[in-house]
Image (spheres, grey):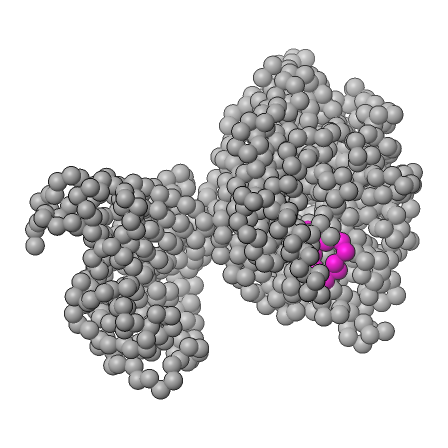
């Protein structure tokens, strides 16, 4: 035990460059990289730095999950409720969970009692596009970190909740904000805290920043849109892409590509995977070309901030199909692969060593904008399904409208999917919906919405929008499907107990048989669930934790969908579930 | 609903909450929950006869690692505050402890404030005097406790009468939606004292100094200040707490040589915002300081 600790300490010292201060005790970078192997804690967004959301715990399983019961519930309090999209971090018996309006709590995992609360003092006039949410914290050493709605990253002393440092990511007045869970990765510079930016609807340019996790000093920055310069150690490094290769004129300057959903890391290839959002503005006629690297997955070298490879899911997007969704590393057929379920309705399997397309398939029904994917994974476009050019209309004010599937909220949105090492299936929280969309003229103005489009969402089917699908990644076969009336927005967890957990806007946390899709358990949490559940072991028991609190983008942009959700009430609480003692013993 | 609308709504609920917190605080503190109670040491009788004296003494004075356990009432310390607060958001307080030898620090406490601790001043190279403004939530003793090099606390104070509500009101800054634009701006002025290596430094920091008791507005206040002369010598250190008034205005009396041309003020608030400013020292002394 002592030896192991000593080795780990030595390893982490080696990993830290000489310029950084001594590493404080606590969570090490090895702990983070091996998060999926330590069921006693949850140190990363995804329960796994690769994002698999698969737990090896099996104490709660198909045969006993029906008895799962709440142990305690913690209120986020105040009048500040709104959407709670957060996943907890758990370390040494303490739950660190973030909430709406840039708040964070440390909670005793045993009793549900608050240890501390931190409230960021937000300025007036912040510009979050899609509710005042936060997706979670990061942990390293003696600190916990999270991003605030005014686009700052805050490091807190994990024992006291006092601010250790605060760094401005960018100017909130220009439309920047921050909602993702930060990612902590190893590098030759030591542990880096990696963040993206939010604000894609305001004409900002997406980028990935990496800071020294101890001090918060910027190490490198990588813009996602071609023509913009990156930095390394305070100096300009290289330009992203080649200016005007896939963007006309000056349009790249406000080109979007927001990295608003954070990223994953693959320890095998030592790459950061970040997704990029839609190109700006939405009106595609203003920016002919592929518009790199909007709507893409980027593999970034943590040592240099250079892009190893990029894969565009929707080149020249015209429907707001952000390419931000998580890219999850997994191995199959003896190959190093990675899977992602895109907003555009297609599932992509990539070779994660080089970004080459392996296979792909639609995971939602009735996709209208593309007939399919070609051998390189490029969509085979249905040209007529682009919203028409406003310039071709009589008064030049509104282009021809089209009905496109999926809707701009996507076949899958921010809610993370899970990959089971037990079943080899991906569990995708998807939505079946389309939209009427039309283009309008627009020009860039700092801090103002930069869309150039109007839209309204419509359900495709009578009884449901939400669709949780169990999918074989190499064949595209849908093994089972669970249909939900309201759109799914909560994220998925799967376990070696043969279970799949997800929450619904109707307020239920549900457990399904991972093999058959049979619903085995549900519990009403009092408000809609838009957050991913997490599981860990404490005192020999397996527990499940989830945030409850309806909100996010659906109630704000919902269109006709509002009928399925308008009666849902807000909330803000954290629920912890476990098996009653007697059952757990069996 | 916009942010500002939400905040406006909440401001109307403020008073109720503050009253509740006061009651809750009072019952907690008088319940004898103080952990660090010294064994059998008699506290000197409080000249202000405050019901909070025992908890102030145990929480703030005897718990200090440099305290030798002795507390004495010492009227040589001058604590000046108005008898009645005209504006409970801005009550001027001055402490002059220059009569005490080897002052390590000056701690100011307003016993009956929901957050009693006001500030701590370490006059490292400065006279043991300080002036500032505070918020008060009701009539309260305001006391200065001065720790000397031996570890003895010297205590003096005054009673300040006030109508309620100073701690639970939103900062005036929030009347303006872009308050954050000028956050932590520092203004300062220095007057040299005639014939002495000393000056008066008055500075003000633009900061809302939220107590966290106004509903919906988290605590947000300047936490630390460090004053350094242009030769790099630290003149004084301040630990500031929530009850110091919005846009804290503080006057101190540093010792500075003729060669010093600037004093640097460096600070940090509880949200981790860092700020600094440099105040020029005039070459000659002015009339203001020669007046007695």
Frontmost residue, B238 versus A373: B238
Residue B250, image x, y percentages: 26, 52
Residue A258 in picture, x, y percent from top left: 63, 33
- Residue for point 69% across, 34% down: A300
Q: Residue at x 79, y 19 (%)?
A: A383
Is residue A399 in sight in this rendering? no
- Closer to the camera, B143 or A308? A308
Q: How many marks?
A: 0
- Whether the magenta-drawn stretch holds residue A38 is answered as yes
Q: Name the residue located 45 percent from the left edge and 49 percent from the top edge.
A: B272
Q: Picture coordinates of residue B34 (x, y %)?
A: 42, 77
Left/right placement of residue A56 relative to residue B45 reads right
Location of the C terminus of chain B (image quadrant): bottom left
| Predominant SS of the magenta segment | loop
Q: What span is in magenta?
A: A35-44
Q: Residue furthest bottom?
A: B40
| Image point (71%, 32%), residue name | A298
Question: Residue B236 occupies which quadrant of the picture?
Answer: bottom left
Q: Is residue A496 visible?
A: yes
Q: What percent of the width, then of the height, locates residue A209?
A: 59, 37
Q: Is residue A228 above or below residue B292?
A: above
Based on the picture, tell me whether residue A205 belongs to the magenta stretch.
Answer: no
Quadrant of res B143: bottom left
Q: Left or right: where does residue A178 sit relative to residue A285?
A: left
Q: Nearer the viewer, residue A16 or A152?
A: A16
| Residue A475 versus residue B101 in the image, above or below | above
């Amino acid at each position: 035990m002592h030896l192991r600790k000593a080795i780990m300490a030595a390893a982490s010292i080696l990993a830290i460059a000489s310029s950084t201060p001594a590493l404080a005790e606590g969570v090490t970078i090895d702990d983070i990289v091996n998060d999926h192997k330590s069921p006693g804690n949850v140190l990363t967004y995804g329960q796994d730095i690769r994002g698999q959301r698969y737990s090896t715990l099996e104490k709660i399983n198909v045969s006993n999950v029906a008895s799962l019961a709440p142990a305690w519930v913690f209120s986020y309090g105040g009048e500040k409720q709104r959407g709670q999209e957060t996943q907890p971090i758990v370390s040494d018996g303490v739950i660190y969970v973030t909430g709406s309006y840039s708040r964070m709590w440390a909670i005793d995992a045993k009793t549900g009692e608050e240890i501390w609360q931190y409230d960021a003092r937000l300025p007036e006039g912040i510009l979050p596009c899609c509710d005042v949410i936060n997706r979670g914290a990061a942990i390293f050493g003696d600190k916990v970190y999270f991003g605030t709605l005014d686009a700052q990253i805050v490091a807190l002393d994990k024992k006291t909740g006092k601010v250790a440092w605060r760094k401005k990511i960018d100017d909130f007045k220009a439309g920047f904000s921050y909602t993702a869970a930060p990612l902590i990765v190893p590098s030759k510079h030591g542990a880096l805290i990696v963040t993206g930016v939010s604000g894609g609807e305001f004409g900002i340019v997406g980028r990935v920043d990496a800071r020294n996790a101890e001090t918060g000093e910027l190490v490198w920055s990588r813009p996602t849109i071609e023509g913009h310069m990156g930095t390394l150690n305070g100096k300009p490094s290289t330009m992203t892409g080649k200016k005007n290769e896939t963007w006309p004129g000056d349009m790249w300057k406000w080109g979007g590509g927001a990295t608003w959903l954070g990223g994953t890391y693959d320890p095998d290839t030592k790459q950061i995977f970040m997704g990029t959002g839609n190109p700006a503005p939405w009106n595609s006629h203003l920016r002919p070309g592929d518009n790199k690297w909007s709507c893409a997955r980027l593999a970034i070298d943590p040592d240099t901030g250079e892009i190893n490879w990029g894969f565009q899911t929707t080149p020249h997007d015209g429907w707001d199909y952000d390419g931000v969704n998580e890219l999850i590393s997994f191995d199959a057929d003896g190959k190093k692969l990675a899977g992602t379920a895109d907003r555009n309705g297609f599932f992509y399997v990539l070779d994660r060593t080089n970004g080459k397309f392996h296979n792909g398939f639609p995971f939602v029904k009735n996709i209208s904008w593309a007939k399919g994917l070609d051998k390189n994974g490029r969509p085979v476009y249905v040209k007529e399904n682009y919203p028409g050019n406003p310039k071709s209309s009589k008064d030049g004010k509104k282009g021809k409208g089209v009905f496109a599937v999926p809707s701009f909220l996507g076949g899958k949105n921010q809610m993370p999917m899970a990959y089971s090492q037990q079943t080899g299936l991906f569990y995708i929280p998807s939505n079946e919906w389309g939209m009427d969309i039309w283009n309008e003229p627009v020009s860039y103005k700092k801090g103002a919405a930069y869309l150039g489009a109007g839209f309204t969402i419509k359900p495709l089917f009578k009884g449901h929008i939400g669709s949780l699908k169990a999918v074989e990644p190499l064949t595209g076969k849908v093994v089972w499907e669970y249909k939900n009336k309201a759109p799914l927005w909560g994220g998925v967890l799967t376990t070696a107990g043969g279970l799949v957990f997800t929450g619904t806007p109707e307020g239920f946390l549900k457990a399904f048989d991972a093999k058959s899709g049979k619903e085995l358990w549900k519990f009403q949490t009092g408000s809609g669930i838009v957050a991913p559940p997490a599981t860990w072991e404490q005192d020999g028991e397996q527990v499940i934790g989830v945030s409850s609190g309806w909100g996010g983008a659906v109630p704000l942009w919902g269109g006709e969908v509002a009928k399925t959700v308008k009666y849902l009430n807000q909330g803000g609480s954290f629920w912890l579930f476990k098996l009653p003692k007697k059952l757990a013993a069996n | 609903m916009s942010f500002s609308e939400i905040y406006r709504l909440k401001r109307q609920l403020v008073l109720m909450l503050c009253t509740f917190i006061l009651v809750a605080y009072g019952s907690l503190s008088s319940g004898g929950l103080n952990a660090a109670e010294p064994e059998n040491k008699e506290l000197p009788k409080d000249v202000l006869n405050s019901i909070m004296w025992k908890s102030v003494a145990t929480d703030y004075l005897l718990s200090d690692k440099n305290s030798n356990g002795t507390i004495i009432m010492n009227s040589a310390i001058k604590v000046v505050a108005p008898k009645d607060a005209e504006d409970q958001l801005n009550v001027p307080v001055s402490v002059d402890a220059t009569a005490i030898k080897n002052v390590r620090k000056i701690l100011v406490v307003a016993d009956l404030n929901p957050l009693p601790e006001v500030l701590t001043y370490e006059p490292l190279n400065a006279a043991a005097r300080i002036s500032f403004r505070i918020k008060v939530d009701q009539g309260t003793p305001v006391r200065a406790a001065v720790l000397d090099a031996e570890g003895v606390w010297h205590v003096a104070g005054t009673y300040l009468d006030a109508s309620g509500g100073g701690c639970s009101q939103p900062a005036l800054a929030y009347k303006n939606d872009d308050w954050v634009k000028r956050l932590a701006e520092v203004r300062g002025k220095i007057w040299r004292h005639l014939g002495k290596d000393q000056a008066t430094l008055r500075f003000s920091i633009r900061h809302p100094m939220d107590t966290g008791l106004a509903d919906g507005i988290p605590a947000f206040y300047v936490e630390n200040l460090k004053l350094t002369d242009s030769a790099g010598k630290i003149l004084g250190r301040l630990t500031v707490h929530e009850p110091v008034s919005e846009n804290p205005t503080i006057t101190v009396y540093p010792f500075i040589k003729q060669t010093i041309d600037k004093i640097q003020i460096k600070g940090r608030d509880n949200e981790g915002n860092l700020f600094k400013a440099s105040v020029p020292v005039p070459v000659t002394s002015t009339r203001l300081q020669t007046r007695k």
